[in-house]
Image (spheres, helix red, strand yellow):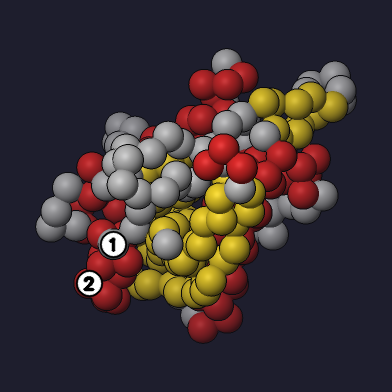
Amino acid sequence: MYLEVFFDVETKKLFGDIEGDDPGDLGVSIVSVYSRTIDINLGESNMVSSVEPVEGKMQSFWEEDFEHMWPIFQEADRIIGYNSIGFDVPALAPYSNFPFQKLPHFDIMQKVKEAFGRRLPLDALARETLDREKTDSGLNAVFYWQKGDKESLEKLQKYCEADVLITRDIYDFAFKNGHLLFKDKWNTLRRVEVDFSYPPEDPTRQVGLF
């Protein structure tokens, strides 16, 4: 049994509102977290034959609730995000009283860049891989926070949670199919070959996936 945590961070400011380019200076408005336990089924030759989600739960945390969020990350076997190592992790780091960046992070954007040679937007992969699009934008997420009324904050939470679900579904597709899809600037459908599995670190434990 493995615990996977998918997450996304929205911020209070834009880079144009601060000096420099440190995400830690943007301030975090909300963090949405989807955690699930995975049961690994092994087939012939000790290879993974299927992955069965045992349970899953979406939670969103405002700044005053972060103390309840950290144990979820600390207990995870892998923490999955999109551009998380470059953005979400450093944005959250100032709020933690432990080395958050040293937890087992798995950045899908980083893996795609390693396989393809350049970064790709989440929306570009979602459109062609899942036939879905992001429900809103990070720019609007900041505006929702700054407006601060109930309706705007509800929109902010809904958007953040939707991004987490797209991240989860892209990851699951890549694991099952070994590739992701996007269209290049010439509108040509392209395929990125990826391997999201990992070899076991402990021979006494079954192969992990995330």
| Residue that label 2 marks | 67
Residue 194 seen from this side = yes
Q: Name the residue: 48% across, 66% down.
A: 36
Q: Element type at marker 1? A: loop
Give the farthest residue toward the front: 44
**Quick one: label 1 or label 2, which is nearer the N terminus?**
2
Amino acid on which disc 2 is placed = Glu
Quadrant of res 152: bottom right
Q: Position of residue 132 (x, y in %)?
A: 78, 53
| Residue that label 1 marks | 75
Q: Nearer the viewer, mark 1 or mark 2?
A: 1
Q: Position of residue 57 (x, y in %)?
A: 50, 74
**Quarter of the figure that contains the N terminus:** bottom left
In the depicted structure, whether residue 135 falls above or below residue 154: above
Horizontal relation, residue 175 to residue 75: left or right: right
Q: Position of residue 103 (x, y in %)?
A: 27, 47
Q: Position of residue 171 (x, y in %)?
A: 60, 47
Give the farthest residue toward the bottom: 150
Q: Name the residue: 67% across, 34% down.
A: 178
